[in-house]
Image: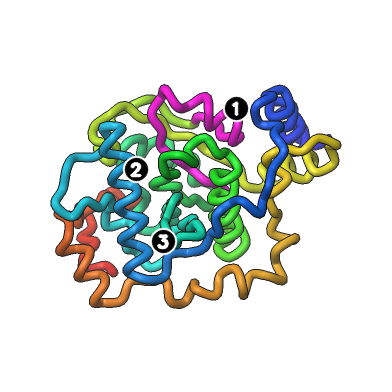
């Protein structure tokens, strides 16, 4: 067994030993998931994130009642939303692809990320939340992550996800979502100056784990985690909104004017970039 298979097998056992993740699933009851390709859907997603992060102390009050940064408006950023039968956005996940201007997490742990970038193509889960009554629904969380996985690995050849989380939530991501810590704890302005750590998920390893778990007789959350090969023929349908998901000039101006956005970032080259001019 090679190193990746061995590591995947170990993580499979971690999941199997968590009894609360081995619950029967009713996929038909989960909200539908898609990329937010309209201003209306993006506004709903940003407002859901604002409400969640304000409650947790990660955001400050704002007149717009939306939570996002300039990274959320970049061309390759995907805002994945879960929509219930009442057309209410009940879950949101933003995936930011690495570029010359770097990632939001560079602010927190640039040295470790620069080293990790060698041989890896990164994307950051920059925001993630589910609403109120569905917060305990790990099935919805997996569905959001799975859609982001298919977009990142299947369309963009991303090898690894990274995410910044509050240290008190770190074990959840490690034990149930297979992430591993790669950076030291620090204060992160994107989370309101609260402590945060950087975690990493090897997407190839995650795919191996899901395949191994498919062979188990019990129902579990990863039953609904589809691999790229399983959905390759459906990519046109899954991501039919991809070409229309980017911000138009009007929408970009709308969102920039709604919030006092961070318009500068330190890129991978160590220089400060004016993001307004680089889009």
Which of the marked residues, 1 or 3, is nearer the chain's N terminus?
Answer: 3
Tell whether label 2 touches label 3 (CB within 8 Å).
no
Judge depth for marks 3 and 2 and give the one in front.
3
Identify the element where label 3 is drawn. loop
Label 1, label 3: how many angstroms apart (C-alpha)?
27 Å
Closest to the observer, 254 or 279: 254
Q: What residue is rendered at 42% in x and 22% in y?
A: 168
Label 3, label 2: how many angstroms apart (C-alpha)?
16 Å
**Crowd band around label 2 with a 10 angstrom C-alpha radius: few (<14), some (14–19), many (20+):** some
Q: Which residues are magenta?
A: 159-181
Which of the marked residues, 2 or 1, is nearer the chain's N terminus?
Answer: 2
Closest to the observer, 52 or 270: 52
Q: Is residue 47 left or right of residue 184?
A: left
> Where is residue 121 drawn, in percent x and y?
53, 52
Measured along the vertical axis of the image, is residue 183 above or below residue 73? above
Identify the element where label 1 is drawn. helix
Q: Which residue is mark 1?
A: 175
Q: Which residue is mark 3?
A: 77
> Where is residue 254 drawn, in percent x and y?
20, 68
Closest to the observer, 177 or 85: 85
Magenta residue check for 88: no
Q: Which residue is mark 2?
A: 106
Closest to the observer, 93 or 220: 220
Q: Is residue 279 left or right of residue 201?
A: left
Q: Is residue 213 left or right of residue 143?
A: right
């Amino acid at each position: 067994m090679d190193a990746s298979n061995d590591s995947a097998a170990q993580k499979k056992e971690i999941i199997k030993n968590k009894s609360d993740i081995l619950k029967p699933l009713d996929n038909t009851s989960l909200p539908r998931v898609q990329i937010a390709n309209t201003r209306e859907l993006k506004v709903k997603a940003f407002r859901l994130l604002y409400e969640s992060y304000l409650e947790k102390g990660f955001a400050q009050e704002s007149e717009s009642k939306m939570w996002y940064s300039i990274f959320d408006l970049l061309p390759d950023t995907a805002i994945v939303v879960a929509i219930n039968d009442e057309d209410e956005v009940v879950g949101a996940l933003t995936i930011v692809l690495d570029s010359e201007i770097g990632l939001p997490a560079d602010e927190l742990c640039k040295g470790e990320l620069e080293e990790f970038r060698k041989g890896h193509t990164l994307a950051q889960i920059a925001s993630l939340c589910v609403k109120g009554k569905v917060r305990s629904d790990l099935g919805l969380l997996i569905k959001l992550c799975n859609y982001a996985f298919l977009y990142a690995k299947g369309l963009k050849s991303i090898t690894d996800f990274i995410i910044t989380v509050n240290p008190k939530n770190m074990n959840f991501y490690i034990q149930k979502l297979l992430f591993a810590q790669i950076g030291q704890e620090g204060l992160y302005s994107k989370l309101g100056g609260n402590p945060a750590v950087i975690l990493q998920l090897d997407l190839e390893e995650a795919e191996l784990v899901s395949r191994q778990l498919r062979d188990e007789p019990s129902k579990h959350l990863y039953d609904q985690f589809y691999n790229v090969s399983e959905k390759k023929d459906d990519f046109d349908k899954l991501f039919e909104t991809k070409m229309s998901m980017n911000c138009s000039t009007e929408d970009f101006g709308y969102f920039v004017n709604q919030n006092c956005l961070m318009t500068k970032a330190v890129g991978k080259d160590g220089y400060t970039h004016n993001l307004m001019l680089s889009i």
